[in-house]
Image: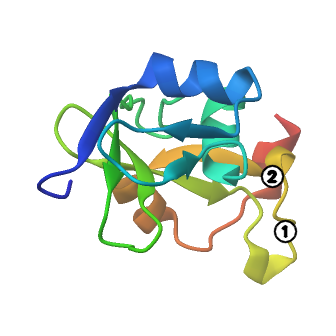
Amino acid sequence: MEAGALLFDTETVIARVRAGIKRMQLPGICHSVKFAASMRLRLFAAKGVTCVDCGIRGAVFALEFKTLPTPHLNLYTKNGILMTMDHIRPRSKGGPHQLGNLQVMCSPCNASKGDAWNPAKLAA
């Protein structure tokens, strides 16, 4: 997590995404932050904030400014592990970039999975 990031609890961010709020004006910041346009945020709102592989849970959203001019909201665990969006069927193997083909994974589990795909797992 970047030093100086603004922190938000998961419930606040998820509630705003579910309510269809598309932007949030932040105190002391000249521009607002997009919420609903982010596929990752929609994934977290729809499927939760827990890694499907190891069960670790995202605890805090950090608004990070390393991607200026547009700040970026990232979800981290209490231990600072980044939570990511994973394609169940990888895009490299024809998987679509749609919510139904996405799952929540922590960055270590996502890196371990790579572009592996188990079609039998989808049938379960």
Which of the 4 quarters of the picture holds residue 55? top left
Residue occupying image coordinates x 84% and y 68%: 95
- Ranked by sequence position, the earlier of labels 1 and 2 is 1
Which of the 4 quarters of the picture holds residue 69? bottom left
Rounded to the nearest angstrom, the CA distance separating label 1 from label 2 is 7 Å
Check disc 2 and give the amino acid type.
Answer: Asn
Asked whether, in this view, residue 88 is left or right of residue 111, the answer is right
- Which residue is denoted by mark 2 in the rendering? 101
Asked whether, in this view, residue 63 is left or right of residue 114, the answer is left
- What is the x, y in percent for residue 14? 57, 25
| Residue 52 can be seen, yes or no | no
Crowding near the residue tagged with mark 1, few <14, some 14–19, many ≥20 C-alpha atoms within 10 Å? some
Residue occupying image coordinates x 77% and y 28%: 20
- Which residue is denoted by mark 1 in the rendering? 95
Compared to residue 105, the image places residue 17 above or below, namely: above
Compared to residue 61, the image places residue 101 above or below, namely: below
Residue occupying image coordinates x 48% and y 19%: 12
Name the element at disc 2. Answer: helix
Give 5 or 86, whichever is nearer the viewer. 5
- What is the x, y in percent for residue 8? 34, 29
Compared to residue 17, the image places residue 105 above or below, namely: below
Residue occupying image coordinates x 49% and y 40%: 53
Please give the label number shown on residue 124.
none
- What is the x, y in percent for residue 24? 54, 37
For the view shown, which residue lies furthest in the left direction? 3
- What is the x, y in percent for residue 54? 40, 37
Counting every numbered tag in the picture gives 2
| Residue 92 can be seen, yes or no | yes
Q: Which quarter of the figure is the C terminus placed in?
A: top right
Q: Do the numbered discs 1 and 2 sit on residues whose CB atoms are within 8 Å?
A: yes
